[in-house]
Image (spheres, rainbow, N blue to C red):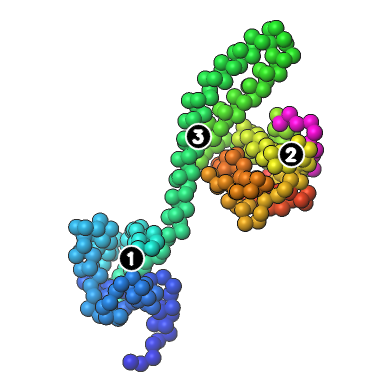
Amino acid sequence: MGAASLPEQGFDELPTEVAILDSQGAIVITNRAWRTFASANGYTGDPTFSGVNYLEVCDAVRHDCEEAALAADGIRRVLSGEDDMFALDYPCHSPTERRWFLMRAVPFRSSSNGQYAVVMHLEITDRRLAEHRVKAQNDRFKMLAYVLSTNLHGPLSEAIAAARQLEQRDEAAGNTLVQTLEQIETVVKTGTALAEADSTIEQVPVTLREQAEVAWERSQNENASFLVVDSRIFLAEPNLLQLLFDVLFSNALEHGGDTARIRVGTTYTGFYVEDDGPGIDPANRERIFESGVVINSTAERAGMGLPIAARIAELHDWSIHAEQSNLGGTRVEVNGIEWV
């Protein structure tokens, strides 16, 4: 056999499994990735796939495998000229791992030999697993909304009513209690709305300093050091932004103690909240925003609200991550802000 041409060499080096089928579905040529995958997954036939008809292989199992039937029918439509492209996501699990692939088939015509189809198989396992994780997290948020709406709204309303009666006898104590309960009620309502929210929220211009200071006042901590270093105006949903600050301040105080130092400021593309607490191991900084993750050590225990913070950022099309702060503790940065 002579040396391969430059196009043939390039075809063979493609990292995705690719085969070319003739008008009847017979395999004309495959690239190295196709042959390697087949060999690694139990194929013992001719390594050149000579005599193998892709459509016949699919047809042989179409009654037992829905994806095989869909693939055969789709490729036939491409070969006949009925469709310009066919795509199919399908599972291809092995005994040791779960895998998903995307098959694409596109036509091309040879001036001398008629119609052909290029069939490609691209592994999309990482994407599919990420989709599963997102769905699982959304399901947990919906469960949170159910718990909040069914178990807290009623008792909170009763507690507020009782606090108003107390207010008539002891105005100062009653007023403080009413305000505290109303703040809790606002957080519960906002949390419920957050858990049930779709991807559309109404954003208005807000000031970083004002939003951060209002949230800090709710923490009712007089011993910690709090400073807004600088401030800008940006677009956000105010209630969700308040909840985001509540989560970040609560997390900083939980790990840094009542005398923690907390700073808020802007970056080129967003803002940060940093503290002088014990910090988080670099290996765990991204995982703390995942729902259900618990870091073992006390200093690194994932805050229960941090997945909520990540959800708020997601709804705004922001990104959120943690790193070491200039104060020695943790710095949480929110980026992707639209400055006004």
Q: Nearer the viewer, residue 191 or 143?
A: 143
Disc nearer the start of the sequence (1/2): 1
Q: Which residue lies most toward the top here?
A: 169
Residue wearing tag 3: 144
Disc nearer the start of the sequence (2/3): 3
Residue 310 colored magenta? Answer: no
Q: Nearer the viewer, mark 1 or mark 3?
A: 3
Q: Which residue lies most toward the front here?
A: 297
Task: Tell me which amino acid carries mark 3.
Answer: Leu
Above-or-below relation of 109 to 127: below
Q: Nearer the viewer, mark 1 or mark 2?
A: 2
**Residue at 64% in and 14% down:** 163
Residue 257, numbered circle: 2
Residue 46 quadrant: bottom left
Residue wearing tag 1: 105
Residue 248, numbered circle: none
Q: Residues within 10 Å of mark 1 (few under 14, many from 20)?
A: many
Q: Nearer the viewer, residue 40 or 5?
A: 40
